Image (cartoon, helix red, strand yellow):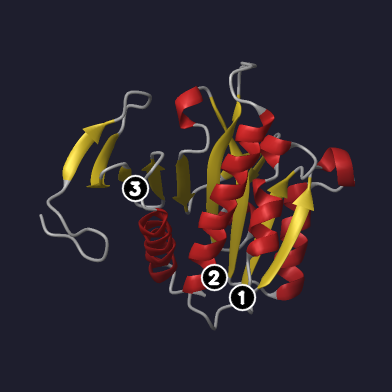
Amino acid sequence: MKKQGLYLEESTRVKDSNKEENYIKIEKGLYISKLSSKKEKIITIKYEEGVDIENTIRLVQDSINELLKEMSINKNSNILFIGLGNKEVSVDKLGYLTIEKIVTNQMKIYKDTMKVTNINTLKFIKALVKELNIDLVVLIDSLNTKEINNIGKIIEISNSKLLIGEDVISKKTIKAPLITIGVPLILEEEKLIITKEEINELVENNSSIISLSINRLL
C-alpha cells in the first residue's frame, strides 16, 4: 500500500506490547494507529528515542489537518486553543507550555485546575464558546497512563471526549466541534522511576512538537 506525505514506504503493522492496538510503521521508531467509528476518530502517534523529530512534527501536523478537513475547519475559522493542567506540576504542565509556544492568529488561553482557579473547566469552556462564537475548540492536556513505557512517547489526537474530574468535555457538552491533543505523562500508580529532570525534558519536547505542528498548519 503506497502512502502520501510521510507514508513513503510499504506499511508494516506492529503490535504494541502495552496496548491491544496495531500500529503502522512509518519509519524506524515512528508509528501511527487510527481507530474510527461513525462519530469518533482517535489517531495515536508513537515515537521512540532517536527518531527524526521533523518527521514526527509532520506526522502530527498531518494528523491534525486530517481532522480539520473532516470538520471543514480552515485558517479562516474561529478556533480556540485551550491548554489544561497545572503549570506548577511537572507532569501536568503540557497544556501551559504548548499554549505559550503557539503563535497563530487564532485565540489561545491557559486554564489551570479548579483547585487553583475555583472555576469549573466545563463551564469555563462553554462560556467562551458561547461568548466568542467558536467554530472549533482544541484542548491540550497531559494524560494518565498505567504504562511506564508510554510516558512522553505517545501523542493522541482525536475528535472524541476528554474527562476532567467528573465532567465530560465533548462536542455535545460544549456545543462546539472539539479536537483533543494529549500526551501520557501522569502515571496512575506511583513509581519512582523517572526523574523530575527527565519528565521536564519530555514535557518540553512534546509541547514543542505539538505547537510547531499547529503553527505550521495555521
Q: Amino acid at mark 1?
A: Thr
Are the two marked residues, 2 and 1, in contact with CB atoms closer than 8 angstroms?
yes
Q: Which mark is residue 37?
A: 3
Q: Amino acid at mark 2?
A: Asn
Q: Circle 2: is it few (<14), some (14-19), or many (20+) Cα within 10 Å?
A: some
Are the two marked residues, 2 and 3, in contact with CB atoms closer than 8 angstroms?
no
Q: Where residue 120 sits: x, y (%)? A: 81, 46
Circle nearer the N terminus (3, 1): 3
Report the residue marked by disc 2: 215
Q: CA distance from mark 2 to mark 1?
A: 6 Å
Residue sitting nearer the eye, 95 or 81: 95
Q: Amino acid at mark 3?
A: Ser
Judge left or right: residue 108 versus residue 188.
right
Residue at the spot 31% in from the left edge and 41% down from the top edge: 29
Q: Which mark is residue 104?
A: 1
Judge left or right: residue 124 versus residue 27.
right
Circle nearer the N terminus (2, 1): 1
